[in-house]
């Protein structure tokens, strides 16, 4: 398998965690977003969306969108599982992931904040306020939903952790005060002690600057 990734992409980050968690061997192919390599003709032939991550399977199929990639990995490599067997627990885990994927991540993408600044003349202070608003709204809800630790759903790593950890990484990069969410911060620290999460960390990638 080949994973087309950028070290600081949180979407690619969650896929890296999944691959390491399931102990799936893969080749890391760096795509430098700052140099616009994702918009190159050669990469657009691989992923017409011009986004990372993209996963090329051993038979040459290319999968896009992190959620779809992780779903594929879960179905083709079901052990260790990222989703509980119980239907309610499974739905709750997916709700965690979707809260991050839909309510936080897309609103804080560099492409969004750049558009706010360059096309709508939003100043840096207001853009920062925009970023922190979406972090606060969803993190506050997720903090109250943590019923057990050390992980999002208790004693086992689930899909929820794969989505949460990269988003907290983004929040810390943006100087968001995570001390307001001690349960989430504790999960972040617990997960990062595990080998799959450590191996997937942005600073541990070959293209890390």
Image: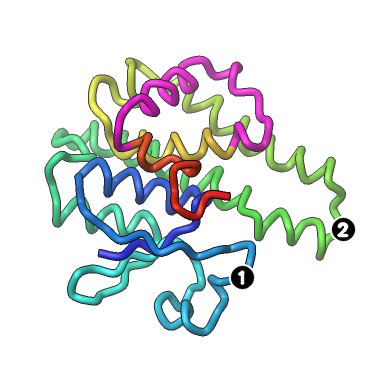
Q: Give the range drawn in magenta.
A: 171-196
- Is residue 64 toward the left or the right of residue 170 in the image? left
In the image, residue 1 above or below residue 176: below
- Is residue 33 toward the left or the right of residue 159 in the image? right
- Is residue 154 toward the left or the right of residue 202 in the image? left
Instruction: Give the spatial CA distance, label 2 vs label 1.
Output: 23 Å
Residue visible at 19% across and 70% down in the picture: 58
Secondary structure mainly formed by the magenta segment: helix
Q: Position of residue 15 (x, y in %)?
A: 35, 51
Residue visible at 35% across and 16% down in the picture: 147
Check residue 121 in the rendering and tell me which mark sits there, or answer none.
Answer: 2
Residue 156 image-quadrant placement: top left
Residue visible at 60% across and 32% down in the picture: 172
Neighbour tally class for label 1: few under 14, some 14-19, many 20 plus, Cα within 10 Å: few
Residue visible at 63% across and 36% down in the picture: 173
Specify which label sits upstream in the sequence, 2 or 1. Answer: 1
In the image, residue 144 above or below residue 51: above
Instruction: Determine the secondary structure under disc 2.
Output: loop
Rendered image coloring scheme: rainbow
Nearest-to-viewer mark from 2 and 1: 1
Instruction: Determine the secondary structure under disc 1.
Output: loop
In the picture, the quarter occupied by the N terminus is bottom left
């Amino acid at each position: 398998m080949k994973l087309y990734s950028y070290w600081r992409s949180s979407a690619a980050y969650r896929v890296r965690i999944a691959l390491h968690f399931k102990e799936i061997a893969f080749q890391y192919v760096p795509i430098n977003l700052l140099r616009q390599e994702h918009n190159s003709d050669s990469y657009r032939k691989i992923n017409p969306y011009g986004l990372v991550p993209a996963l090329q399977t051993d038979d040459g199929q290319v999968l896009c969108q992190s959620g779809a990639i992780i779903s594929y990995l879960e179905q083709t490599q079901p052990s260790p599982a990222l989703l509980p067997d119980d239907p309610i627990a499974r739905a709750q885990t997916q709700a965690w992931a979707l809260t991050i994927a839909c309510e936080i991540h897309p609103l804080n993408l560099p492409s969004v904040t750049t558009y706010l600044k360059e096309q709508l003349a939003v100043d840096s202070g207001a853009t920062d306020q925009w970023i922190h608003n979406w972090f606060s709204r969803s993190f506050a809800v997720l903090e109250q939903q943590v019923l057990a630790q050390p992980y999002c759903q208790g004693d086992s790593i689930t899909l929820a952790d794969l989505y949460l950890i990269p988003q907290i990484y983004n929040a810390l990069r943006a100087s968001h005060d995570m001390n307001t969410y001690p349960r989430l911060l504790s999960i972040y620290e617990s997960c990062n002690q595990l080998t799959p999460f450590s191996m997937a960390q942005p600073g541990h990638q070959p293209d890390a600057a």
